[in-house]
Image (cartoon, rainbow, N blue to C red):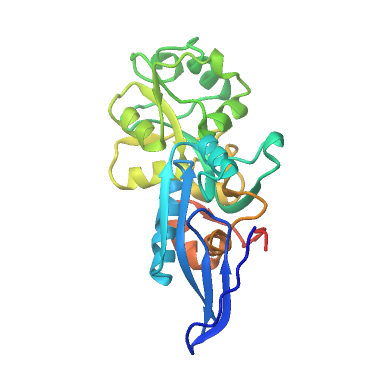
C-alpha cells in the first residue's frame, strides 16, 4: 500500500489526506473532524449480494458526494478472482472463502438462506432431501410421484461459479456432474423468472430474493426444507438448514476508501437496507486491514 500525505489545502482541512493503493480509489481528507472521501470503487461478483450492495452504495454516495461506487454481477467466483487480480476493489461472495483463497479477507455484511421454489399453483407441499436429489438426478421426473399433479418436472439448475449452486450441492451431498438439468440459469432473478414462467419447474434461489419477488406478486412459492419454513426469520434464528453468510472480499490491504465502504456496510446505518432486501443484518465484525 502506498500512502501519500498532502498539505493542508484550506482553513477547514485539518491536514490529513490519505491516498490508497486502489486503481481509481481512495482520497480521504478530514474536514471538521469527519472524513471527506473522494474516488471510485468497483465491486463485482455475487448476484445475491449485488442488489444489497447497490442500495448501500447509493446511501454511501449520498453521504460522500465525491465518491462513485460501481456494482457489477457475475457470480461469487468472479468476484473473488477480480478482487485477487485487482480488477475490482471489492469482490462480492455469497459463500465462505475456500482454503486455497486464504490470501484474501472476507468481511461479513449479512446472512441469507437458499430455498427451493416452485410455481405458485404447484400443490406439492414439501420435498424430502432424498426426493430433491432424485428429482435433480432425473430419477423422479413427474410431480404426481411427490404429491403433485400429473405433470413433468422441469429441473432448473444454476450455472457453475455460482455460490448458490455450491451451497445447494453441498447440502444435498451430490456432485454437479450427476445433476440432470433441463434449464441452466445464471442469477437469482433468472431462476425466479424461469420457474414463474413454467408451472412444472423447480429451482433454488436466495430466500431474500424469493421473498421480495413473492411480495411483488411473482407467482412462485418457497418450499420448506426439513419441515422448516424457508424464510428470513428462520435464517435469522439459525433454524433453516441451508443458510449462508454474504461477504465482501478484499486483499489483506484494501484501499482506505474500500475499507471505509466496508465499515459502512457492516454498520447499523444500513440495517434497514439489509432488512429491505430480506436479508439478516449481522453485528459489526470489522476485520478490514487498517
**In the picture provided, is 95 more to the left or to the right than 217?**
right
Would you identify the image quadrant in which residue 262 lies? Answer: bottom right
Q: Looking at the picture, tell me which residue is in the foreground, 65 or 14.
A: 14
The residue drawn where x is 45% and y is 18% is 146
The residue drawn where x is 51% and y is 47% is 88
The residue drawn where x is 54% and y is 83% is 8
Q: Looking at the picture, tell me which residue is in the foreground, 244 or 186.
A: 186
Q: Is residue 277 visible?
A: no
x, y percentage for residue 207? 46, 42
| The C terminus sits in image quarter | bottom right
x, y percentage for residue 148? 38, 20
| The N terminus sits in image quarter | bottom right
Q: Looking at the picture, tell me which residue is in the foreground, 91 or 18.
A: 18
**In the picture provided, is 231 more to the left or to the right than 16?**
left
x, y percentage for residue 64? 43, 70
Number of numbered discs overlaid on the protein picture: 0
Q: Residue furthest front?
A: 7
The residue drawn where x is 49% and y is 51% is 279
Q: Looking at the picture, tell me which residue is in the foreground, 232 or 227.
A: 232
Amino acid at each position: 500500500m502506498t500512502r501519500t500525505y498532502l498539505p493542508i489545502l484550506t482553513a477547514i482541512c485539518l491536514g490529513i489526506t490519505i491516498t490508497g493503493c486502489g486503481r481509481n480509489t481512495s482520497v480521504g481528507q478530514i474536514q471538521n473532524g469527519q472524513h471527506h472521501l473522494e474516488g471510485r470503487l468497483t465491486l463485482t461478483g455475487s448476484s445475491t449480494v449485488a442488489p444489497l450492495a447497490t442500495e448501500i452504495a447509493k446511501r454511501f454516495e449520498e453521504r460522500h458526494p465525491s465518491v462513485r461506487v460501481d456494482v457489477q454481477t457475475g457470480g461469487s467466483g468472479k468476484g473473488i478472482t477480480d478482487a485477487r487480480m485487482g480488477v475490482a476493489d471489492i469482490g462480492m461472495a455469497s459463500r465462505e472463502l475456500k482454503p486455497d483463497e486464504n490470501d484474501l479477507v472476507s468481511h461479513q455484511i449479512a446472512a441469507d438462506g437458499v430455498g427451493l421454489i416452485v410455481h405458485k399453483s404447484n400443490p406439492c407441499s414439501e420435498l424430502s432431501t432424498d426426493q430433491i436429489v432424485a428429482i435433480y438426478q432425473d430419477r423422479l421426473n413427474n410431480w404426481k410421484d411427490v404429491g403433485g399433479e400429473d405433470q413433468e418436472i422441469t429441473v432448473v439448475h444454476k450455472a457453475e461459479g455460482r455460490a448458490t449452486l455450491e451451497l445447494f450441492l453441498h447440502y444435498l451431498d451430490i456432485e454437479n456432474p450427476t445433476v440432470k438439468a433441463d434449464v441452466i440459469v445464471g442469477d437469482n432473478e433468472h431462476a425466479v423468472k424461469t420457474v414463474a414462467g413454467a408451472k412444472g419447474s423447480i429451482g433454488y434461489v436466495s430466500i431474500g430474493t424469493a421473498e421480495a419477488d413473492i411480495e411483488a406478486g411473482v407467482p412462485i412459492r418457497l418450499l420448506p426444507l426439513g419441515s422448516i419454513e424457508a424464510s428470513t426469520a428462520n435464517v435469522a434464528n439459525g433454524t433453516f438448514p441451508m443458510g449462508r453468510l454474504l461477504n465482501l472480499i478484499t486483499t489483506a490491504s484494501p484501499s482506505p476508501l474500500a475499507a471505509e465502504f466496508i465499515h459502512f456496510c457492516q454498520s447499523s446505518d444500513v440495517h434497514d437496507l439489509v432488512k429491505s432486501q430480506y436479508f439478516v443484518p449481522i453485528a459489526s465484525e470489522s476485520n478490514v486491514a487498517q
